[in-house]
Image (cartoon, rainbow, N blue to C red):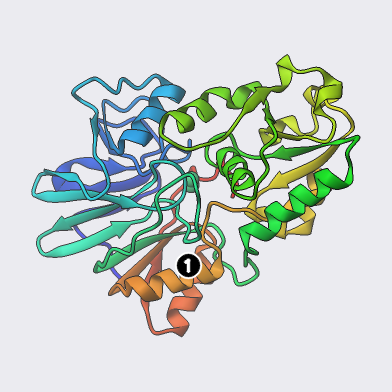
Amino acid sequence: MAKPKPWLEPHSHGLYVKPADLWIDPSRPVARAAVTHGHADHARSGHASVFATPETLAIMALRYGVDVEASHNQAFGYGDGFERGGVRFSFFPAGHVLGSAQILMEYAGERIVITGDYKRRADPTCAPFEVVPCDIFITEATFGLPVFRHPPTGDEIAKLIGAVRAEPNRCILVGAYALGKAQRVIAELRGAGWNAPIYIHGAMEKMCALYAAHGVDLGELRLVSETDKADMAGQIIVAPPSALNDRWSRRLPDPVTAMASGWMRVRQRARQRMVELPLVISDHADWDELTTTISEVNPKETWITHGSEDGLLRWCELHQRKARALHLVGRDLEEEG
Ligand SMILES: [Zn+2]
Ligand SMILES: [Zn+2]
């Protein structure tokens, strides 16, 4: 097993960059936090100072009231960064959600990349993942088991459109996380030629508006709360997963329940949520994307966190790659694949 670096300490609540006195994605309030993206298991409220991409800061402003204008918070575009305590920090696209970044740290001739969450397939709502050469690669492993192989996104979107066309008197209710997955499903539908208005739950309105303000074309969105039940027959509704089986869905015309998540690969998960139409659409790398990425980045050491560490650790061992599992807590509170 590889040794931790003296200048970068893995703690249960985040990675601490010692010479810079700065945390990456800490799960508790700190003086200085660099944040990879806006999901709640990475971006928390209460930090005195936040360093992130402009989009991530905008998302944190929307969710937690983080003041984007305040000088103690700083925004950096992709390829850009800052220096603190002799450590150079730079942000690179992670392809996960709008504004998501990998963070490259350079110190004393050593390069460490922390991916945050990432994926490799095309996503019309965010910049594609960039391979950043480094000595130590700290990768997520949400789907770090060979059983997780996501099908082509286009096939899942075609399945969704086919289902709504097959049931013109019903509607399809798609459960999708409010940050990232919902906007991606909508943008993918637009790309596949679905031009009808898409109906959304009120909890998604502001985040969809934020995406649109950042140039992501979501087409015409309408609020379910402002629409007559009969008008939603033969239409697509997008709502947070928590709304799928609650009273809210009674205002919809005989909904077929769908859910967009990498976990839908597991039948048991779909059954638990009473999902009739599982859509395997994930914002996390699947097994092949994880292993391909490690091969392409080709680091001296791989550190694995955020999911099925042991599966990916085993793969690294089999391929003579130096690796270790970090056991950080407080992950996967909200986004779920
Ligand atoms: Zn995430
Ligand atoms: Zn995450």
What residue is drawn where x is 18% and y is 41%?
Answer: 21
What residue is drawn where x is 37% and y is 55%?
Answer: 115
Please state which of residues 114 and 55 is positioned toward the viewer in this rendering: 55
Looking at the rendered image, the quarter that the N terminus falls into is bottom left
Is residue 275 in sight in this rendering? no
What residue is drawn where x is 42% and y is 35%?
Answer: 215
In the picture of the structure, the residue carrying the numbered disc 1 is 290
Residue 300: name its quadrant: bottom left
Residue 65: name its quadrant: top left
Specify whether 110 is left or right of 225.
left
Specify whether 151 is left or right of 95.
right
Query: How many other residues sit within 10 Å of disc 1, few (<14), some (14-19) or many (≥20)?
Result: many
For the image, the number of numbered tags is: 1
Amino acid at pointer 1? Leu
Percent coordinates x, y for residue 124 in the rendering: 50, 48
Specify whether 21 is left or right of 10.
left
Kindly give the residue lying farthest to the top in the view shown.
Answer: 226
Residue 222: name its quadrant: top right
